[in-house]
Structure formats: structure tokens, C-alpha cells
Image (cartoon, rainbow, N blue to C red):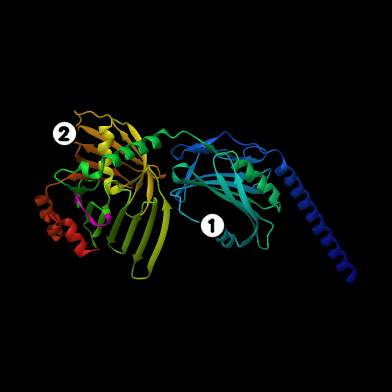
Amino acid sequence: MNGTYDTKVSIRVKVAFLGLFVLALASARVMVALRSTIILSAPIELSHAGFAVRMPDGNGWQSPDQWDYRQRAFTLYGTFTPNSPRPLASARCTCVFPAEIIDPQQRFTNLEEKLDGHIIKSGQIETEIAVVDWACIQKNDSWSGTMFGMADLPYNRRIEIEVEEGAGDMDMAEQVFRAITESLVITESPLLEAGSSVISDMKAKGVASFMDNQNRQDLFLIRDSRRRIIGFTTSVLVDMGKGVDGFTIQAAGLDYIRGRPAHEEVTSFESDDRFDRFAWKSEAIGIELSGTTLTLEDDGILAVDRSGFSAEVELSQENRYKTGQTVMPDILLDLLIVRMIELNTEEIIVDVIKADGRIIPTRISRVEFDKAAGLSDVSYMLKLTPLDGRDSFQHVYLDDRKRVLRTGLKRESIFWFERGNPKDVAELFPERKEFILQSGKIERYRGNHI
């Protein structure tokens, strides 16, 4: 029995050693392949970001030829699978926008904790267009590791480059990482430049110059895809002449959707005439309560303070972002459209700041239309397309005075915003009658909400 048992053990040991030898041989072949000349793809441009990058492609690497929108960011993701069903390494480039202000070392520390690893070295790579801060992170109790780097790019974008490998060779990961990093190039971005030009012209002109009798008031009924009236939106924009802390422009608004419970969002906005500085508050009331406070200072830093409350939990979060000459607060977007028409500009891209703190690159285009097709009262038509990977767009129709008549919004469904008469809207929504007919909306808003 002992002899038989020893023989079986011996066979198992030999098989185990043979398996290790095969694994080591396969790993060695992988290392040779990984260390071979890195072939890069043609430059892959992210058109509305103003840059392009090349990815490893060939010698076992497979990479896409265009950017994909994933998890609220644009991404390129390539894998290394030489004669293997499972990736042995991967490379990822991510365009982060807006570029949140964060210290690179803090970013590396956060990633270190996320990956359950430790930084074995770090440094900088200087190219002609960017300075890339990087760190090499070795996972604990594992052969695998990650090369990660980040760099600021034009128009307040940021690129993050990440190379992972699982064969215990960080030199290979660094070689691929450096090849990608050094391939970064700046591309022309005429639509962003056009957007910056229109915004600069609007700043020089000043918000007050767009006012009729020192104020603008709008009221629109909201209809769903079946043309049923489901709510309304109203706003007022006022030139105060002289204000506190140089804030001469003030605005207030209310979006109301009837339901059980009703959804209501109220906003308060004040800025200087060039909107280089502003304070913007919004509060959404429905099933849950949430609020956002946006503050833009002279240094171009946007502080976003979000809070939320439900029956289960209360949340609070604060972030700070870089901005530039391409950003535009959504509450003033109608004025930008007017200036775009006046300048006879056909198409632009701007970074639209939403009341909830999101910043979304948006393409705004003039659209040709047929007045005979039920648009006899329309003089101008524009299309707004968010470049955030969602299947959504907005059509804006204006009359000969460049006043918005109606808007068609396509998201998950289609919604229409049609200009309404205050008295008629008040009859449809008697529960908000006082606010609809109130001329001093700003004072009423401040007193009831913020």
C-alpha cells in the first residue's frame, strides 16, 4: 500500500511540476511578445476635445478605432490577447470632463486603495503638449500591476492613461504606457473655438444689453409626447443696475411637473454683467429633496456643493472644477443663441453648466426649415445636441424678434415647451397661481426657498 501511495504522489508531483513548467514557458513567450516592438494605431481623435491619441494595435493587441462613451466619460480600451481567450494586459485612455481639481498624488493614493496595492515608483513625463504625472502600482499578494497617469489638456479636458498587466512585468506596462503618452497630439477644434468666440463677444456686450426694459420674462407650458399638458416652466431675468458684490444680474425660475407627488425645481441666480462671477442655487422637491449650490469666482474655479435627503439617508458632496472661455451657464443659454444668430454663426460647441452642477459639451447648430411646414411664425431654428453619449437633442424655434416660441426636447421621450399666457397657465395650475402671476418672482423665491 505504501509503495502504491508513494507512486501516486510521485506522479502527481511530476504532473504539477510539468504544469508549472508549461505555465512558465507560456509566460516567457508572453513576455517576449510583450517586449516586442509596440505598434500603435493611427491617431484617434476626440473631435470636441481638441486632442488625439494612438493606441497599441497589433502583435497581440486589439484596440478600437473610435472613442466610446462609458460611465459618463469617453474611453478607448484595448486588450492584449496573444493566442489566449483571456486578456493578459489592457490599456485604457479616458477623457475626463469637466476636469475636477485634484492633486495627482491624492489621485494616486485613492487608486492605490481601490486596487489594494502600493506605489512602487512615480514621476513625470513631459511631452510637447502636456506634463503627465504617473505612478506605478503593484497589487498586494499578486503579480499584476498598473501604470496610471493623468495630464491636463486644452479646453479644460484631462486625459487619464492606464495600463494593466498580469504577468509580473511592470517594465512592459511602463513601455506601453510611455508609448501611448508620447503619442498625444493637439488637433484643431474649430467649433470649440467658435463657441469661445461667441461667448467672448457676449461677455464684451454684457448680459444687460439683452434686456428689454431691464428684464426678460418667459413662461412655457410643458407637453408630453401625446401633447398632454403636464407642467410649466417660468423664469425672470433682471438687470438690477447696482447690486451687492458687483452682482448686477439676477434671475429666478420654477419648473413644475404635476404628479403624485408633484416635481418642483426652483432656482436663484445672480452674476456680474460678464458672468465671470456668479452664485447659483437650485432646489428640487419631489419624492426626494436635493439641492445644488454653484459658485464661480474670478479665478475660473467652479465650486459645486450638492446635497440630498430622503427618508433613508442624507448626502452631501463638494467638488471644484476648472472652467474657461467655453463655459456657459444654462440659465443664460437663450441669450447665447440670440448672439450666435446676430453674429451669423452657423455652428458652435460650448460647455453648458447645468443647475445641478453637470457640465455638458453641447453642439449648437443653425437648421434650415420650411416655413410652409407649419412653421410660418418661425424665423430661426436651432438644434442643441449634448455630446455626452446620450441619444438626446433639443430643437429651439424663435420668431423674428429672436424670442423663443417653443422648444422640442427628445430624451427618453419627447417633450414640448410652448410659450403660454400667464392667466391661462394660472387657471391650469391654480396650486401655483400666486407664483405664475407674481411680478416680483425673485423676491418671492428668496423668501420661500433660499
Disc tally is: 2
Crowd around label 2: few <14 · some 14–19 · many ≥20 (10 Å): few
Residues under labels 2 and 1: Cα distance?
Answer: 54 Å
Q: Position of residue 103 (x, y in %)?
A: 52, 56
Q: Position of residue 354 (x, y in %)?
A: 33, 51
Question: Disc 1 marks which amino acid?
Answer: Arg
Residue at the image position 68 percent from the left and 60 percent from the top: 142
Magenta-highlighted residues = 238-245
Tell me the number on the disc at residue 377. Answer: 2
Question: Disc 2 marks which amino acid?
Answer: Asp
The answer to whether mark 2 and mark 1 are in CB contact below 8 A is: no
Q: Nearer the viewer, residue 240 or 16?
A: 240
Crowd around label 1: few <14 · some 14–19 · many ≥20 (10 Å): some
Tell me the number on the disc at residue 107. Answer: 1
| Left or right position of 64 against 122 | left
Label 2 vs label 1, nearer the camera: 1
